[in-house]
Image (cartoon, rainbow, N blue to C red):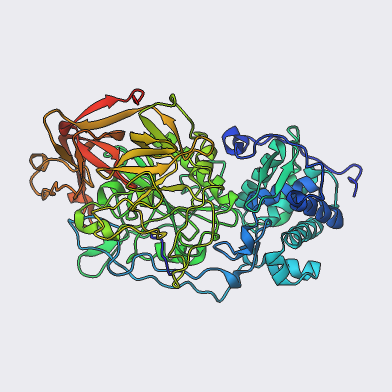
Amino acid sequence: MRGSATDPTSTPGHRHLRRIAGPLASAALLLPLLGAAPAPTSTDSSAARLQHAFATAAADYHVPQSVLLAVSYLQSRWDGHGGAPSVIGGYGPMHLIDARTALATTEHFAEGTEDARGDTARTALHPGIKEPDESAVPARLRTLPKAAELTGIPAGELRTDPAANVAGGAALLAAAQKELGEPLSADPADWYGAVARFSGADDTATAEAYADDVYDVLRTGGERTTDDGQLVALAAQPKLTADTAQLKQAGLRTLPTDDTECPRSVSCESVPAPYAQFGDDDYGNHDLGDRPAAQRIKYIVIHDTEGAWDGVLDLVQDPTYVSWNYTIRSTDGLIAQHVKAKDVAWHAGNWDINARSIGIEHEGFLAHPDAWYTEAMYRSSARLVRYLAGKYGVPLDRQHILGHDNVPGPTTSTLPGMHTDPGPYWDWRHYFRLLGHPFKRTAGKKAGLVTILPDYTANRPVYTGCTTKGEPCAAHGSSEVRLYSDHDVNAPLIKDIGLKTDPTNGVNDLSSRVSTGQQYAVADRWGDWTAIWYLGQKAWFENPRREPAAVPAKGLVVAPKDGLTSVPVYGRAYPEKEAYPAGVPAQSVVPLPYTIPAGQRYVVGDEVPGEYYYAVTFTTDSHRVVVGRDLYYEIQYGHRVGFVRAADVRLERVGPLAR
């Protein structure tokens, strides 16, 4: 959805039922932990304060330090976020939650913004949002007040002091262990039930998935430098297994999963979006289809919700609103499925992309850099995407795993209103490691292509627009790199003529930004600067050898055929007029205000057949998938992808770039 700017000993004879985690032990999901590492040798150094805090809290509350560290990693990857709250009002390394401080829901589809359906054959859909009912706050969103009660530490201190926050998390784990009637054992294997309880989940499947992830972290170990420069380490315990039978004592509900399309390694429930008729010949909030039999699924689109879980789920169950296929919860990674994969959800603002894609919403806010995404949510999302990609043959790359901000406007008039989520703070580098397809160098240093790949934590471009006051957004890691018209940070930013505005460093302004994993053809080099072809222009970004923002790559590109001065770029790959049968109005094939001039090259993502899914009535008897003879190439044109007709271009494999 759209980003908004206004937005201690083991008990003898204790039962241990040992089992090695199955699909959850996937190595791909453990890559962010960089391997077993010893704890820092000096707990007095400034960079080891947080490690010392974990040791102290573990001793004070009789919780194994490794368990405390692993739970914290799944909550926050040990980051403190400067005391800023997450999307649900969670604070610190242990993500202790006080729902009273959660960010308010913002409006996704306000009048004059993107039409999520994106079908010019139908009237634009701009429903208003309905604010969620805040009268009942579940226990999972009140862990910080409970930690304050258990520790006697003031809530304000738990929010802002990482050591206090860790102590609060330890107290919660110890309390959960006691409530289960389990001893405060020194053996990490004995804490599975308490870890599951810590997730806040009210169902067995979600609690189990969360606990399994924590124990995967325990087995793998690793070390990481946090967002405030703290070095935290966790020694690997590769042979560790857990007493999973403890989960039966938790008294959680069983989650019905018969009606969901999810991997077994996640928790998933069905919260159906209604297919219902209302008003004068209108219906919502999706279209019935027959994918992939009638039309291939080619894309998975990543969104953020711009709202909290309960309110967002209320919206998707409203037939007058819009829809998406899945939503993922921040606290514990619970997945709700709303629209079957065979059906077409209204989520991307481009009917052609909707008809070929699956949309996944993540509980979060674009314009709040510290309203961060939890590791539990990243991992759950990655498992879901791996499953869907395998089932439907979607390649795991940035040309097919799109952000909503990478979806092109279908027509020129729609370009300014297209959405910009999940935005610059979504960690694409980390996400693709979890997907098991990490971005890496694939060619020599003089290659003619690059993959954008900055260090997320160290890469901190200045953005504005996170508050109504206009001051810079909080400094934060980012997946995106800024583009200039010359090899000089004082040069003008690249302009997107389709937006009809001057470029800015606004958090929602995509005019002059490239994102991690995207690939572009190299246009030039100058010292520590690299130029790429972008929006029909030569665009420069800083790319020093010691701290590169991109790495060499290889692949296919398109260029205008010989004799053509330029070729048009399209926002949708629709068939030619002659392909439409009687009774199906032909859709116009009108280019966007963009071209590829002769001499420029753009990276190819896929070959795409010209298709149009005609679905404008509630009854499905008139629905048709129209397939034409025209073929298109999906290309990385600017920040968003675009399409060019195969008949207009030649396909090339790029070799090393001569100096």
Q: Position of residue 276 (x, y in %)?
A: 31, 62
Left or right: residue 455 versus residue 402 is: right
Quarter of the view holding residue 279: bottom left
Judge whether residue 181 can be spotted in this image: no
Q: Is residue 137 left or right of residue 555?
A: right
Q: How many marks?
A: 0
Seen from this angle, which residue lies furthest bottom? 135
Of residue 257 and residue 378, the one placed in the foreground of this image is 378
The N terminus - image quarter: bottom left
From the viewer's side, name the closer residue of 284 and 596: 596
Residue 184 in picture, x, y percent from top left = 85, 52
Q: Is residue 91 above or below residue 600?
A: below
Say if residue 499 shows up in the picture: yes
Q: Residue at x 50, y 58 (%)?
A: 363
**Residue 335, image x, y percentages:** 51, 52
Q: Quadrant of the C terminus?
A: top left
In terms of depth relative to the viewer, which is nearer, 397 or 134? 397
Side of 12 where 117 appears, left or right: left
Left or right: where 338 falls relative to 169: left
Q: Looking at the picture, how far across and down is residue 544, in whole percent? A: 48, 38
Q: Is residue 632 above or below residue 274?
A: above
